[in-house]
Amino acid sequence: MTTTGKLTTGLALLVGALLVYGGPAWSGSKDKKEKDETKEAVEMSKTAKVTIEQAIKTATEKVPGKVIEAELERKHDKTVWEVEIAGADDKVTEVHIDADSGAVIDTEEKGAEKKESKGKGKAKKD
């Protein structure tokens, strides 16, 4: 075997060993994170008074369109339903619904810096 062949074989063995022994470390931390997120979601679902169906209904009344995702999250220091809606204008808007009261907290166009908060809008100057 030539020196180049030995070097290539050695390098291949080294890379293989790193993948075999390094792989479980990546998957282990990823699995733990997913388990923690799942546990948190289950805990939030136990305390949420508003169902996903109710949150979706409220969100689509606020922002008409097709619901593409809905999930329970921790935002605004409370448990909220985040409902993503694709509108007729091809924009995606997140509608945050309070999981306790069912009230719309705010809406946010994805990718935009503007945020419309309930009761926090500024009056236009003429």
Image: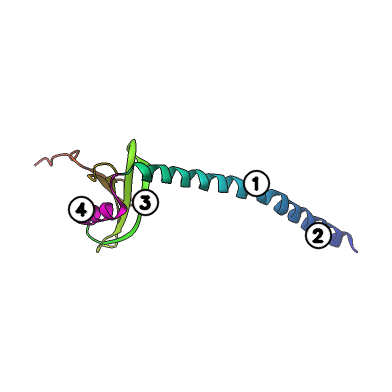
**Residue receiving disc 2:** 8
Q: Earlier in the sequence, mark 1 or mark 2?
A: 2
Badge 4, how many Cα within 10 Å: few under 14, some, many 20+? few
Q: Amino acid at mark 4?
A: Lys
How crowded pointer 2 is (Cα within 10 Å; few <14, some 14-19, many 20+) is rated as: few
In this picture, which residue range is highlighted in magenta? 49-63
Q: Which image quarter is the C terminus in?
A: top left
User: Mark 3 — residue?
Assistant: 71
Name the residue tied to disc 4: 62
Judged from this view, the residue extending furthest toward the left is 126
Q: 103 or 113, which is in the foreground?
A: 103
Q: Nearer the viewer, residue 64 or 99?
A: 99
Q: Residues within 10 Å of mark 3 (few under 14, many from 20)?
A: few
Q: From the viewer's perspective, is 55 left or right of 26?
A: left
At mark 2, the secondary structure is helix
The alpha-carbon separation of the residues under discs 3 and 4 comes to: 17 Å
Question: Viewer-nearest of labels 1 and 2?
Answer: 1
